Amino acid sequence: MAKEIERKFLVNGEFKHLAIRNLEIIQGYLSVDPDRVVRLRICNNKSILTIKAPAENASFARCEWEFEIPYAEAEEIMKICLPGRIHKTRYIVPFMDHQFEVDLFHDRHEGLIIAELELTDEEEVFDRPDWLGEEVTGRPEYYNSNLIKE
């Protein structure tokens, strides 16, 4: 089991010119229960099934398991996912000693931009780029699994 330690932020400025690559992502969910989120992600013909659950004694870390599955099977599983999909473009933006994943949402969430930063420790210190806005770590309304419900 891996542990995901992630901070989330709204984005207030221009970042695209700093990106080293971008990816188109479609996500569906089999479970959005906060104690067991099960997500299916299709990105560039690669398909990942992810299970997330709260980590014990952690403020924002979560347990995370990821499994690559065949693309054809992912297309079939996507058909039985809960209603709603997340469609976003992810920009990979290096900054100082870290790498931000900046998600630009499409469709009904057009205009929402969230930057995520994975850390090795909950207390890890990091530099903030100028385009990084308000921190929204731990705010359920910004979880992708909740965005499909709106």
Image: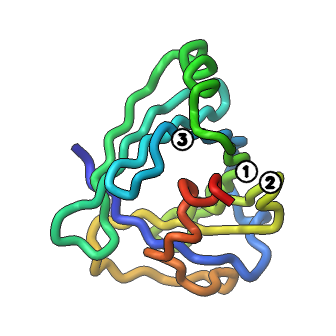
* Residue indicated by mark 1: 89
Q: Is residue 5 left or right of residue 87?
A: left
Label 2 and label 1: CA atoms lie apart by: 8 Å
Query: Which image quadrant is residue 28 in?
Result: top right
- Residue in the foreground of this view, choosing between 12 and 140: 140
**In the image, is residue 144 above or below residue 120?**
above
In which quadrant of the rendered image does the C terminus lie?
A: bottom right
**Element marked by disc 2:** loop
Neighbor class of circle 3 (other Cα within 10 Å; few <14, some 14-19, many 20+) is many
The residue lying at 72 percent from left, 46 percent from top is: 87
Q: Amino acid at mark 2?
A: His
The image position of residue 116, as x and y in percent, is 53, 66
The residue lying at 54 percent from left, 41 percent from top is: 29
**Element marked by disc 1:** strand
Q: Earlier in the sequence, mark 2 or mark 1?
A: 1
* Residue indicated by mark 2: 106
Q: Earlier in the sequence, mark 2 or mark 3?
A: 3
Q: Amino acid at mark 3?
A: Tyr
Q: Which mark is residue 39?
A: none
Count of all numbered marks drawn on residues in the image? 3
The image position of residue 1, as x and y in percent, is 22, 43
Q: Is residue 137 left or right of residue 122?
A: right
Is disc 2 in contact with disc 1, using a CB cutoff of under 8 Å?
yes
Q: Is residue 100 visible?
A: yes
* Coloration mode: rainbow
Q: Is residue 97 left or right of residue 106?
A: left
**In the image, is residue 133 above or below residue 81?**
below
Label 2 and label 3: CA atoms lie apart by: 17 Å
Label 3 and label 1: CA atoms lie apart by: 18 Å
The residue lying at 60 percent from left, 68 percent from top is: 115
Q: Amino acid at mark 1?
A: Thr
Q: Which mark is residue 29?
A: 3
